[in-house]
């Protein structure tokens, strides 16, 4: 039985295994789900152990941190070692009422598997696991050496993996890191990602009066924290999409002409993107930049949530004591998180109206990353993808952030391969997240082919 | 037994009765409390019936409207008829966790009675009821004629009473309306209110994408409804407290020099007001106007609530599909609600960024009101208050809105007496609302004395 035959014969079992993993609501942003997060880690460790990996363990962090799942197979001396990365934690499913099927009861409709985490990132992590399993169970050995490192805090800043990678570089020593957490540009178009934006995620709180006040009795003299946040948010970014933080764009450079030209050749239709994916009245953002450049190579500032005062049915004439907003910035290469944070804090301080106490908390900070394309690990990946998908591999960037890419470069001094099988309409972080099952199966085959090519077999 | 002796002998019973009424969570803004709202109305009708009023009934409105409570005693021919107004509905108690004792379990601490509605307005309405009861039970008759009209929609716009007053002016015919829903300027200072601000209460909704989007994948090109609302709110009012709606201030006139001078003589200390009542870092608002003028004679715009996106613990990188805000404007005399609404809608339309669908809903609209002070009903009230409280009565305005004042003037063509016994620190609409019990008892006595004076006894 060839490796390909093994993969194809086991599709049903692979899908059933992934379904079981997806049923565990391992939501890392919600403390009450910590037991579920742990169950999802144990599930992954059980898989690794079952297929014959060694040193399989849950690596515990500080109190309250989620375990890393580790496992290795190093019995191919002289062959390259690959560090395989994914994450088992997921985003909250809210708003629940918008899901067609419940987020933690995976449901196949057509060729898609619907569930929170189906694409981001249990489904993609499972591709790595099953690609390795095929060799160990089918052939008894791998053509390469592997180390799995699967984290449970990707959606909450990844403090644990950051501490671990920086303190244990020897254990994680490898030739290349493989991250399976990105998307393909189009359903049939094999894709490698060469750059990701960084992320600074923050919370702003404005406090006015000591308690909620009646707007009739105090309106006109008491500070209003909602109004203060509105003023701050409007001051941080204009309706033209330009961020108004002094110094913010200083280090931002445009991609090379060659890269921009390659992006222009991608099959991208702005109208289809607006209609099928966004569904708004119009796209927005900075003038003078293509949509792809805005998404991949321009920094952003977005409010993710805001809350304050009375939001129930009807009318309540209250001036609330407090209001909060969650705001993040996506950074592009060369921007320094610490410098951006300083500029951001200064801008908020300048914008905050008098009479209120405004505090800013930084929840996450990670720089952008660029991947070099001129090494054999990337070249082999492009070839492996082409063989499985039957189309030429394209190189894109991603607008999201995967902080471990920076960590691996800094502490392990290895390139990272961003080979992912999600699709643009997978609705990551949104209701009705799904994974395109043909990509799940082809992803496993592509990884298998990649292992063979890198191992020289 | 004089009327005063009756009132004093029955204090405990009065407090017990009020306590029972306050236990009913008659929150008119929350639909699920409609049965409680009705129970509170029935409680009031039962009181009126029990003390011998006639024609006592719950007047039903359209489906979904809350009943008016009516009752009359018209057996003093040749004597004036007073229309006695209060309301039995209350504001929602949220945030619940800030209450020292639960909002619907009335609790006496020191000289104060703590409960939602204690001051606004069950406690004050109960003053009217008990003042009348004293005469009917103690003396068997009143020195005047009375008609009670107690509503259950004061906190939600009062559509029912508006329809009723405009359609049944003959039944409500009277010489003066007495509204017991305002406050005294200071604990020992008997107070009549001569003006109130109007209110336009609205809801703004901004819709961007068809569903929540991942900010990494779409940030920079997809419209953000939170950012849109921030831009609109910041554009409607500057951090200097100036409302930026074109034409908004056109009809606003300053009070007479005489009125402004009287306000300057009031015992008002800005620092104490800031520290004891507001508890913020500083007061805010328009430069060039005293605090009292800002509160009583300047229009305002305030956001009461805002909601959108992810507001839970931690970080979720979502661009929400929708965000909403509740915003009201307080109007001063001469401003026309319909004109203000038009200006407001036009300003929002102009401010709304592209790519979003922004809708504005008007929940309430009522003009400001001014009361003339040169009639015998007001003069007698000032004297009655002075006799009970032992201090000279002061005339103030109020920053809140009591739409029925305008209704009574327009349809019944009578002056309204705004005689209230709340205190500035009663925390109306806020957690730990309370009523100062000495004012509850003196209020009843003052009303009793007032009835005697107006009746010429």
Image (cartoon, coloured by chain):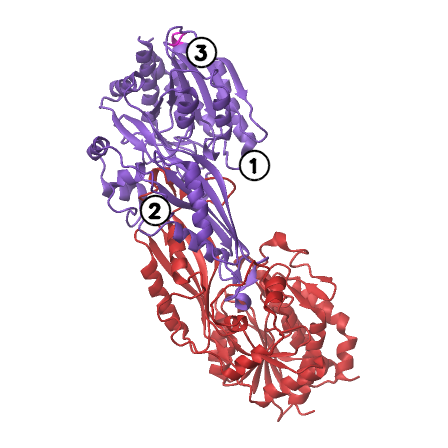
Chain colours: A red, B purple
Q: Are marks 1 and 2 in contact (CB under 8 Å)?
A: no
The answer to which image quadrant residue B12 occupies is top left
Is B30 in front, or is A178?
Answer: B30
Packing grade of label 3 (10 A; few <14, some 14-19, many >=20) is many
Q: Which residue is mark 2?
A: A209
Chain letter for mark 1, please: B
| Quadrant placement of the C terminus of chain B | top left
Q: Is residue A233 left or right of residue A281?
A: left
Q: Is residue B34 left or right of residue B12?
A: right
What's drawn in magenta, residue-wise? B138-142
Indicate the secondary structure of the residue bearing disc 2: loop
Instruction: Find residue B108 and report its horizontal and vertical position in percent.
Output: 38, 31
Indicate the secondary structure of the residue bearing disc 3: strand
Instruction: Find residue A177 and report its horizontal and vertical position in percent.
Output: 57, 82
Q: Which residue is mark 1?
A: B32
Instruction: Find residue A436 and report its horizontal and vertical position in percent.
Output: 69, 69
Which residue is depicted at the point 34% across and 15% down?
B448
């Amino acid at each position: 039985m060839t490796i390909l035959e093994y993969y194809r014969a086991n599709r049903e079992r692979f899908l059933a295994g992934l379904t079981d993993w997806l049923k565990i609501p391992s939501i890392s942003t919600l403390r009450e789900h910590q037991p579920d997060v742990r169950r999802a880690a144990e599930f992954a460790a059980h898989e690794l152990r079952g297929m014959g990996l060694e040193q399989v363990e849950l690596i515990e962090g500080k109190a309250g941190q989620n375990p890393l799942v580790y496992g290795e197979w190093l019995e191919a001396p002289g062959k390259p070692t690959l560090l395989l990365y994914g994450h088992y934690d997921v985003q909250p499913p809210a708003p629940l009422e918008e899901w067609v099927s419940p987020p933690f009861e995976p449901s196949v409709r057509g060729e898609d598997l619907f569930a929170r985490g189906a694409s981001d990132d249990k489904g993609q992590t499972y591709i790595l696991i099953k690609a390795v399993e095929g060799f160990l169970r089918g052939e008894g050995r791998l053509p390469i050496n592997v180390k799995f490192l699967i984290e449970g805090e990707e959606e909450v800043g990844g403090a644990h993996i950051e501490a671990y990678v920086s303190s244990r570089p020897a254990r994680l020593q490898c030739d290349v890191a493989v991250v399976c957490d990105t998307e393909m540009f189009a359903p049939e178009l094999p894709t490698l990602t060469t750059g990701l934006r960084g992320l600074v995620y923050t919370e702003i709180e404005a406090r006015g009066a000591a308690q909620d006040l009646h707007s009739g009795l105090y309106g006109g003299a008491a500070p209003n924290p909602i109004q203060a946040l509105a003023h701050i948010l409007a001051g941080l970014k204009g309706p033209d999409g330009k961020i108004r933080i002094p110094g913010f764009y200083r280090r931002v450079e445009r991609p090379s002409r060659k890269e921009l030209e390659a992006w222009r050749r991608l099959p991208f239709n702005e109208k289809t993107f607006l209609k099928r994916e966004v569904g708004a009245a119009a796209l927005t953002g900075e003038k003078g930049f293509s949509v792809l450049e805005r998404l991949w190579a321009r920094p952003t500032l977005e409010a993710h949530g805001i809350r304050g005062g009375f939001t129930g049915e009807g009318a309540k004439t209250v001036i609330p004591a407090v209001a909060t907003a969650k705001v993040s910035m996506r950074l592009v290469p060369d921007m320094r998180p610490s410098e951006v944070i300083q500029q951001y804090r200064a801008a908020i301080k300048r914008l905050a109206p008098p009479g209120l106490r405004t505090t800013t908390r930084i929840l996450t900070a990670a720089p952008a990353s660029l991947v070099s394309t001129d090494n054999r690990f990337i070249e082999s990946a492009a070839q492996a993808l082409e063989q499985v998908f039957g189309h030429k591999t394209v190189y894109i960037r991603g607008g999201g952030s995967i902080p471990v890419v920076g960590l691996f470069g800094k502490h392990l001094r290895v390139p990272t391969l961003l080979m992912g099988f999600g699709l643009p309409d997978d609705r990551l972080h949104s209701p009705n997240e799904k994974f395109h099952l043909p990509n799940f199966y082809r992803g496993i085959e592509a990884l298998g082919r990649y292992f063979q090519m890198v191992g020289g077999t």
